[in-house]
Image (cartoon, rainbow, N blue to C red):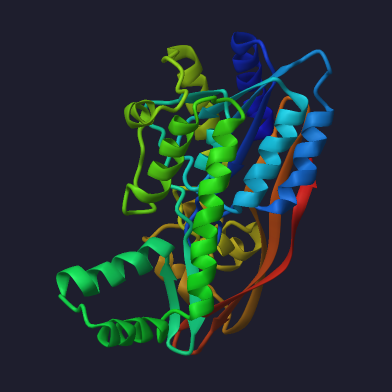
Amino acid sequence: MYKDRLDLYSQIEKKRKRPLIAYVTSSRQNNGAGIISADVIPEFCNQIKLIPDKYKKIDLLIVSNGGDPITVWRIMSLLRERFEHIGVLIPYQAFSGATLLALGADEIIMHPFSNLGPVDPQMQSHSPNGTVHFSADDITHYMEFVKNEVGITDQEQKERAFELLCDKVTPLDIGVARKSTILSMSLGEKLLGTHMQDPNTIKSISSTLNKSFYHHGYPIGKKEAIALGLPVAKANKDIENIMWNIWSDFEKEMKCNDPFDPLSTAMEQDAFAEKCGIVNKHDFSKETYATVITNIPVGVNLVYYELLHAALESRNAHSGYYTTSQLSISKEPNLNLHYSITQICGKWSRR
């Protein structure tokens, strides 16, 4: 919880002699994940306003699977307008857009368990046949496969292969994917250019992160990040331990290791747990599952719950992106359960 992390923030600030802001988005599976998105910008403005003018350096601790690259640029631009030196602390995973954010730092402090990742944009194409996930490189590799591996060189046949591709991914989506790749390359170079001088190094790092790993989830560890030419700081065990403790507390609060389960979530509510014959909601387990199913009233049962998807905080203030949802549990006479979830509201809240 936030109050438990305050002392950890103080410890890092004393050792680093600068303020710290922490930005974490949840990686909880099934219904609880969060992403970097534009609605966090007002919260960053508030955090920056609370920092006394005497400080010219700032640390940003980040854990996230990524999100909107333009928001990343806005965040780093806000920090650059106010501070002369930016450190990014990565206790665990900082993939995709979070890696882009790290590219804008003068100094990157990585825990031995942490990872950066490729920044190649991932796209979705929707059609009557379903949703396809792809990147611009996937299109390129498909056409190369048709030409070099299958051996199709006739122009008419290659055009037919492209038409078959367009049955799965629309031409407009292909254009957007290509444009997004160019944007990612450009932002990577701009972010690196805020603290690096050599244009060749800048282009090399940005190009490598966009094109060289062949999987968007490829984990780039500390040694590989150094080999890429990123400004990764030397190890400091004290800082690493504090970083990990901060992340561990977030991980527990956001339940990142507990995939969202409707019935388990309902059982967290005392009234519903008691209705199902569980006096202590923490006693719910696979051993008590049959009892719970039997005791749930036939018909529609409504349960309300709240999830924390993202948090931005410092010693000065905490804000979180919380959603409140209605969980409907419908039980049939044959004991079959059906679930439906309706999100009632979602917003940043300063607490």
Residue 148 position in % (x across, y down): 18, 68
Which corner quadrant holds the N terminus? top right
Q: Residue at x 60, y 67 (%)?
A: 275
Q: Residue at x 52, y 55 (%)?
A: 182
Q: How far across and down, in percent of the image, does residue 269 sit?
A: 63, 58
Nearer the observer, 171 or 89: 171
Position in image of residue 337 (x %, y %): 49, 80
Q: Quadrant of the C terminus?
A: top right
Q: Quadrant of residue 265?
A: bottom right
Disc tally is: 0
- Name the one closer to the observer, 225 or 274: 225
Q: Where is residue 96 in the image (x, y as percent from the top left)?
A: 48, 48
Left or right of residue 56: residue 60: left
Question: In the image, is 319 to the left or to the right of 72?
Answer: right
Examine the image and state in which quarter residue 155 appears.
bottom left
329 or 77: nearer the viewer: 77
Residue drawn at (58%, 25%), measured in percent from left and top? 195
Residue plotted at (69% across, 59% down): 323
Q: Identify whether 167 is placed above or below 146.
A: below
Name the side, left or right, on which 266 lies relative to 344.
left
